[in-house]
Amino acid sequence: MSDRFDRLFEHRPGECPCCRGALSQALPAKTASEHETVDLAEAHPIIERHRRLSVVCPSCGTKVTAPMPEAARGTPFGPCLHAVATYLKTFQALSYERLQRVFADLFRLSISQGGLMNMLRRAQTRLAQGRDDAISALRQAKVVASDETGVRIEGTNAYQWVFCSAEAVVHRAAMTRGAVAIRETMNGHRPKVWCSDRYSAQQHHADAQQTRLAHLARAIQHKFRRARDQLLTFADWPDAVEATNNACERALRPAVIQRKVTNGYRALWAAEGEAGIRTVVDTARLRSSANP
């Protein structure tokens, strides 16, 4: 049963099946059972039309027109429409063509692909401060986990990086898989512990290293010899360092799906913008789960 409901209907018996006596509404009643039905509200856009009126001044004959209302300035699309488009594009990996079809089929809205692209740009600008706050929190973390995955940007092989700490999840699109991407993101900050796989660019960014134990199972003896100083770091940092780095892999999953569905990004701004959106949303999810 859901914790909340929108409408409540109480069903009382009107007649006793034993003696056929009437059961008054004034009689006390107890709940025998509860049942739920769940449905979606009818989806339709709310369209507001702003009409500017002109009036002729009776004193001097001047034609006076109402000023342009603030709601009519800029884009005609409201914040909820921006939020839905951003969510479907960034977290459900819809292409612009499929996103266009969703709005047409579900909401009877005809929006050009250029209009959808501009929505994403505006959303990225609005979330820039939240992205910067997450990066600042990451640069103060004692424990940082990191991972990267390939992605196509502007027809070129590039990479989607993710950095996870107790207070922030930071996504970054970069054209390189080298350690320079980490150095630019951390901006000189050196955490106490760095959690990653054994990829060379992920090494030597903290005082201690925790390697992913699951990645060592394929070649257990050889890998254990090479990583013997990085196997049990998590034991020295209880409740702070994980042995799996699953948080980074989960955070990268939408980027992997995006790559498989759309084959990457046509422009770098789109990759960087979606990384910023994921940074803000994933950090908010992290903090809300820690402080429900």
Image (cartoon, helix red, strand yellow):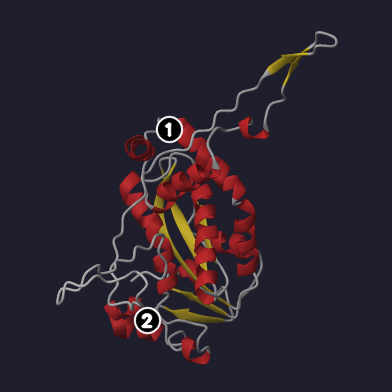
Judged from the image, the secondary structure of the residue bearing numbered disc 2 is: helix
Q: Amino acid at mark 1?
A: Gln
Residue furthest to the bottom: 236
Residue located beneath label 2 in the image: 213
In the image, residue 69 above or below residue 94: above
Residue located beneath label 1 in the image: 113
Q: Position of residue 19 (x, y in %)?
A: 15, 76
Residue positioned 40% across, 30% down in the render? 110
**10 Å crowding of disc 2: few (<14), some (14-19), many (20+):** many
Dot placed on the residue nearer the N-terminal end, 2 or 1: 1
Q: Position of residue 23 (x, y in %)?
A: 27, 71
Kindly indicate the quadrant of the structure image that contains residue 247: bottom left
**Can residue 145 be seen in this snapshot?**
yes
**Can residue 198 be seen in this snapshot?**
no
Q: Amino acid at mark 2?
A: Leu
Disc 2 from disc 1: Cα separation: 44 Å
Q: Position of residue 7 (x, y in %)?
A: 39, 60
241, 15: nearer the viewer: 15
